[in-house]
Image (cartoon, helix red, strand yellow):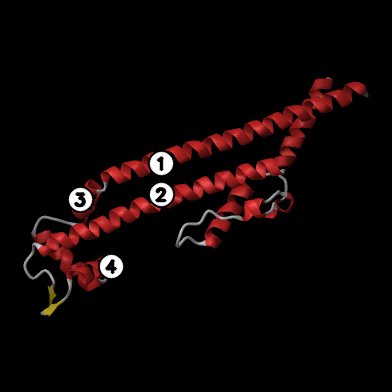
């Protein structure tokens, strides 16, 4: 009966941890300059990082500085993964544009629309932005030669395959580190729960 009461009490404490109001959480940004530093690369948005940190904090609900450190690490690893995925998309997009420009150079008068001559780089840039006239013109030219935009992306993928594979390995490594961080956080919390149950049992036994 004594241990059952202690177990119920411990479960109540764990439930209280999960339902703790947001204003009682330990937020990393409130823990000094170390936690306030944002791992931003050139062109990245500070507000977007802060939003991610806040959402991870609410999801993991850190209640002390140790847990807050894990939250910060997990957030930074998530941010780094997002950066690498954007880099992969950029490589494919820029590579596809280069492949398209090279293909258009092999098509006579590909740079002429309605009698007006354009530079191929500007025409490809307009196509990439989705401008109707450029899209209609270039898609028509590609179709006449049995090609399409997917073919350009495939060429870009083949050209950048080594770089993309390296990026994918980096993403996998970061995801593994993030998973370990989450597991370490859970083990830390379980250890705290065991210590709480031992204290509760000792108090009940004394009484």
Query: Residue reaching furthest right?
Result: 207
Q: CA distance from mark 3 to mark 1?
A: 23 Å
Q: If you read the primary sequence from the N terminus, does the residue marked by circle 4 or circle 1 appear first?
A: 4
List the residue tagged with mark 1. 170
Q: If you read the primary sequence from the N terminus, does the residue marked by circle 3 or circle 1 appear first?
A: 3
Q: Badge 3 local density, few (<14 within 10 Å), some, or many (20+)?
A: some
Q: CA distance from mark 1 to mark 2?
A: 8 Å
List the residue tagged with mark 3. 155
Q: If you read the primary sequence from the N terminus, does the residue marked by circle 1 or circle 2 appear first?
A: 2
- Residue 79 location, x and y as percent? 50, 50
Q: How many marks?
A: 4
Q: Looking at the image, is mark 4 or mark 2 nearer the viewer? A: 2
Direction from residue 169 to residue 39 in the image, left or right? right
- Residue 86 location, x and y as percent? 39, 53
Between residue 151 and residue 84, name the one nearer to us: 84
Q: CA distance from mark 4 to mark 1?
A: 32 Å
Q: Are marks 1 and 2 in contact (CB under 8 Å)?
A: yes
List the residue tagged with mark 2. 84
List the residue tagged with mark 4. 130
Q: Are marks 4 and 3 in contact (CB under 8 Å)?
A: no
Q: Are marks 3 and 1 in contact (CB under 8 Å)?
A: no
Direction from residue 8 to residue 80 in the image, left or right? left
> Looking at the image, is 20 positioned above or below residue 5?
below
- The residue shown at (72%, 38%) is 15
Q: Badge 2 local density, few (<14 within 10 Å), some, or many (20+)?
A: some
Q: Badge 4 local density, few (<14 within 10 Å), some, or many (20+)?
A: few
As helix, strand or loop, the secondary structure at mark 1 comes to helix
Query: Residue reaching furthest left?
Result: 108
Q: CA distance from mark 4 to mark 3?
A: 20 Å
Instruction: Name the image quarter holding the N terminus.
Output: top right
């Amino acid at each position: 009966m004594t241990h059952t009461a202690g177990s119920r009490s411990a479960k109540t404490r764990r439930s209280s941890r999960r339902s703790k109001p947001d204003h009682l959480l330990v937020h990393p940004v409130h823990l000094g300059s170390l936690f306030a530093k944002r791992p931003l690369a050139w062109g990245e948005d500070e507000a977007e990082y802060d939003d991610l940190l806040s959402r991870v904090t609410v999801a993991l609900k850190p209640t002390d500085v140790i847990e807050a450190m894990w939250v910060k690490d997990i957030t930074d690893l998530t941010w780094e993964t997002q950066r690498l995925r954007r880099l992969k998309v950029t490589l494919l997009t820029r590579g596809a544009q280069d492949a398209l420009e090279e293909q258009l150079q092999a098509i006579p008068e590909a740079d002429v629309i309605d009698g007006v001559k354009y530079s191929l780089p500007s025409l490809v840039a307009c196509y990439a932005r989705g401008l109707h006239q450029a899209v209609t013109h270039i898609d028509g030219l590609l179709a006449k030669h049995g090609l399409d935009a997917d073919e350009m992306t495939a060429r870009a993928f083949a050209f950048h395959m080594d770089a993309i594979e390296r990026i994918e390995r980096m993403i996998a490594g970061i995801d593994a580190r993030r998973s370990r961080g989450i597991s370490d956080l859970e083990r830390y919390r379980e250890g705290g729960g065991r210590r709480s149950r031992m204290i509760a049992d000792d108090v009940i036994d004394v009484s």
